[in-house]
Image (cartoon, rainbow, N blue to C red):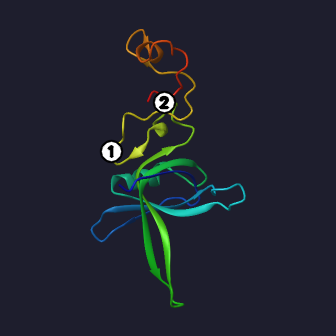
Amino acid sequence: MNSCILMAKIVTNPELRYTPDQLALASMLVEFSGVGPNDPPGTMKAVGFGNLATEIQQNYHEGEQVIIQGRLRMNTIDRQEGFKEKKAELTISHLYKVGSLHENSPSSNPVSSGSPNNVVPINRTSSPSYGDNNSYDDEFHEEGTKGNLDDIPF
């Protein structure tokens, strides 16, 4: 299965275009950290289609930190110099603003082509509560391990 999750910064404002079949297409460049401390940051083109494309163009702007989930694809481009160049492209299925996952504003809602309702926030500091008075620690623990569970409930 081809699935990729990338934390990146938007380098160019999303550009909205339409295919000959009138399908909306938003494309933007994103920048992400290198693998090592001395590696330069990498850049990649990210694209979204349909209703997702119009939402990306309206709600996301240059300089914002995002988490992108999608499919990675390699495009081959024929250059005038006589060689072929390969470029990576990420087809977006879900897009989230970093730092707004806990806010209750319209911009905190993820933009996706089928938003999941089971997203666990990355920077949560306490265990979630389930039901009326049952906490995660009370409901899901083995004998003698209460209080030793990490913050992620899986």
Q: Is residue 62 left or right of residue 59?
A: right
Residue at 46% x, 55% y is 57
The quadrant of the picture occupied by the N terminus is bottom left
Q: Out of 89 and 137, give the one closest to the viewer.
A: 137
Residue extending furthest left?
Answer: 21
Q: Earlier in the sequence, mark 1 or mark 2?
A: 2
Residue 3: percent from left, percent from top = 40, 53
Q: Disc 1 on helix, strand or loop?
A: loop
Numbered disc 2: secondary structure: loop
Residue at numbered disc 2: 104
Quick check: 129 above or below 71? above
From this view, report whether residue 85 is shown above or below residue 19: below
- 34 vs 13, nearest the viewer: 34
Residue 6's place in the image compared with 72, above or below, is: above
- In the rendered image, residue 25, in percent from the top left (x then y), is placed at 38, 62
Which residue: 67% across, 56% down? Answer: 36
Cα separation, mark 1 vs mark 2, equals 19 Å
